[in-house]
Image: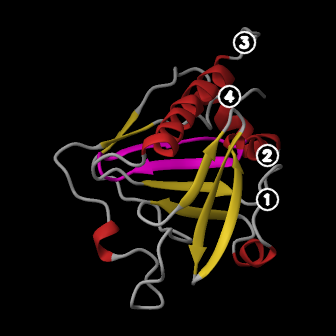
Amino acid sequence: MSVDHIRYDLLTQEALRSVLRRVLQDAAKSGLPGDHHFYISFNTGAPGVRVSKRLRAQYPEEMTVVLQHQFRDLTVNEQAFEVGLSFSGVNEHLVVPFDAIKRFFDPSVQFGLQFETMAATDEAGPKEAAASAEAEKTPAKPVPVAKATAPAPAAVSQEPAAKPDVLAPEGDAPRKGDGGAEVVRLDRFRKK
């Protein structure tokens, strides 16, 4: 097998992250259009992630935030986005590098992206390396999902719902539509 000196896997991942960056930049400038809202899951232990000690203790590995109604001060640059959210009535400021993002989902149009974070790539074990070698024989492509569901949010951009164990209001649940979501997985295309 020949060696990929160009690193198409990294180029593709960066191109898909630029889609996310552009969507967040537009939301920062003009707000969310129509019914669009975003579930963003990220690795809380990734380099550059800034969350409070309280949130890091509550979500030591991964956290999902929902940008819909009550978020503030959304700013986006080339490397990260920053946003103010309320968690159980406590205002928090988060900084999330794009490299830390694992999943992005917009349930209003059933569109999602799944990323392999750099930390997970570096820590892949022998089993994943074997699977990766096998997957490198197959080109990257969107994976249709029949009925995509949003990831269970670890936190939401709104005040807590009436039930303490419900994190997203009932109206925020993804709608079942005619078409499926487009999910792109890049975790199978990493260098050995």
Q: Is residue 78 left or right of residue 192?
A: left
Q: Which secondary structure, mark 4? A: helix
Of callouts 4 and 2, the N-terminal one? 2
* Residue that numbered label 4 is attached to: 133
Number of marks: 4
Residue at mark 3 to residue at mark 4: CA–CA distance: 12 Å
Of callouts 3 and 2, the N-terminal one? 3
**Label 1: how many residues lie within 10 Å, few (<14), some (14-19) or many (20+)?**
some
- Are the residues flagged by discs 2 and 1 in contact, CB closer than 8 Å? yes
- Are the residues flagged by discs 4 and 2 in contact, CB closer than 8 Å? no
The image position of residue 31, as x and y in percent, is 42, 48
Q: Which residue extends farthest left?
A: 178
Residue at mark 3 to residue at mark 1: CA–CA distance: 29 Å
Quadrant where the N terminus is found in the figure? top right
The image position of residue 189, as x and y in percent, is 64, 28
Q: Which secondary structure, mark 3? A: loop
Q: Is residue 67 magenta?
A: no
* Residue that numbered label 3 is attached to: 4
Along the line of sight, the residue nearer the viewer: 51 or 174: 51
Q: Is residue 109 magenta?
A: yes
Name the amino acid type tagged 4: Ala
Of the two numbered discs 3 and 1 in the rendering, the one whose residue sits closer to the viewer: 1
Which residue sits at x=56%, y=71%? Answer: 154
* Residue that numbered label 2 is attached to: 119
Of the two numbered discs 3 and 4 in the rendering, the one whose residue sits closer to the viewer: 3
Disc number for residue 45: 1
Chain part drawn in magenta: 100-117
**Label 3: how many residues lie within 10 Å, few (<14), some (14-19) or many (20+)?**
few
**Label 2: how many residues lie within 10 Å, few (<14), some (14-19) or many (20+)?**
some
